[in-house]
């Protein structure tokens, strides 16, 4: 499974609508797990047929591209659930089995963090997708019927609120 993720991460980003091949180092973009003074956070929720599968919270911040330091290891959020692979891919097995989800930062934009999402079994990659996590509002993706990915800003409580 890891080999599939690593192979996917090694591929260059070149599809239409994605970051340009030569982005400006001065462009200010959203980045996850950054070290910023603002400490904005997003909540990530994944549900299947209305049932919660995974929930996580992570820091996001705006930084100049040129100030973002590469990390030696890609941060990957992972979780496993049970599903029939044919739900993701026509012709795949119909027997319910463990499916692993992996989520990582696939790109940085001025208005969103682009999350790469991969679902796989121990035998095959079932699906790759992109989710635009917008720090200024809720974003929802449903690439497979009933499998919903939502990101939304963490509501900050002010002093005195309960």
Image: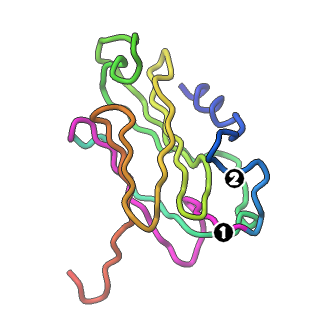
The picture quadrant where one finds residue 155 is bottom left
Disc with the residue nearer the chain's start (2 vs 1): 1
- Residue at image coords 27%, 35%: 146
Q: Nearer the viewer, residue 61 or 12?
A: 12
Rendering coords of residue 110 (x, y %): 60, 64
Relative to 156, residue 30 above or below: above
* Residue 43: mark: none
- Dot 2: few (<14), some (14–19), or many (≥20) neighbours within 10 Å? few
Looking at this view, name the residue that lies furthest to the bottom.
160
* Residue 71: mark: 2
- Residue at image coords 34%, 50%: 45
Rendering coords of residue 136 (x, y %): 44, 68
> Rounded to the nearest whole Å, what is the CA distance between mark 2 and mark 1?
19 Å
Which quadrant would the C terminus be assigned to in this image?
bottom left
Secondary structure beneath disc 2? loop
Secondary structure beneath disc 1? strand
The count of marks equals: 2
Relative to 59, residue 6 above or below: above
Q: Which residues are magenta?
A: 27-50
Relative to 20, residue 155 above or below: below
What colouring style does the render use? rainbow
Does residue 56 appear to the left or right of 9 in the view shown? left
Rendering coords of residue 53 (x, y %): 29, 40
Does residue 2 appear to the left or right of 90 in the view shown? right
The picture quadrant where one finds residue 80 is top left
Q: Which residue is mark 1?
A: 28
Rendering coords of residue 60 (x, y %): 52, 64
The picture quadrant where one finds residue 91 is top left
């Amino acid at each position: 499974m890891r080999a599939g993720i690593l192979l996917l991460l090694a591929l260059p980003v070149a599809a239409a609508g994605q970051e340009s091949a030569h982005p400006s180092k001065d462009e200010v973009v959203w980045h996850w797990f950054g070290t910023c003074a603002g400490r904005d956070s997003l909540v990530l929720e994944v549900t299947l047929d209305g049932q919660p599968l995974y929930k996580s919270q992570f820091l996001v911040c705006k930084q100049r591209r040129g100030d973002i330091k590469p990390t030696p290891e890609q941060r990957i959020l992972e979780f496993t659930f049970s599903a029939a692979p044919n739900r993701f891919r026509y012709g795949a097995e119909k027997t319910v089995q463990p499916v692993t989800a992996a989520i990582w930062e696939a790109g940085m934009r001025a208005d969103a963090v682009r999350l790469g999402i991969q679902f796989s079994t121990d035998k095959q990659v079932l699906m790759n997708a992109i989710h635009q996590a917008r720090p200024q509002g809720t974003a929802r993706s449903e690439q497979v019927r009933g499998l919903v990915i939502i990101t939304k800003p963490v509501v900050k409580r002010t002093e005195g609120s309960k």
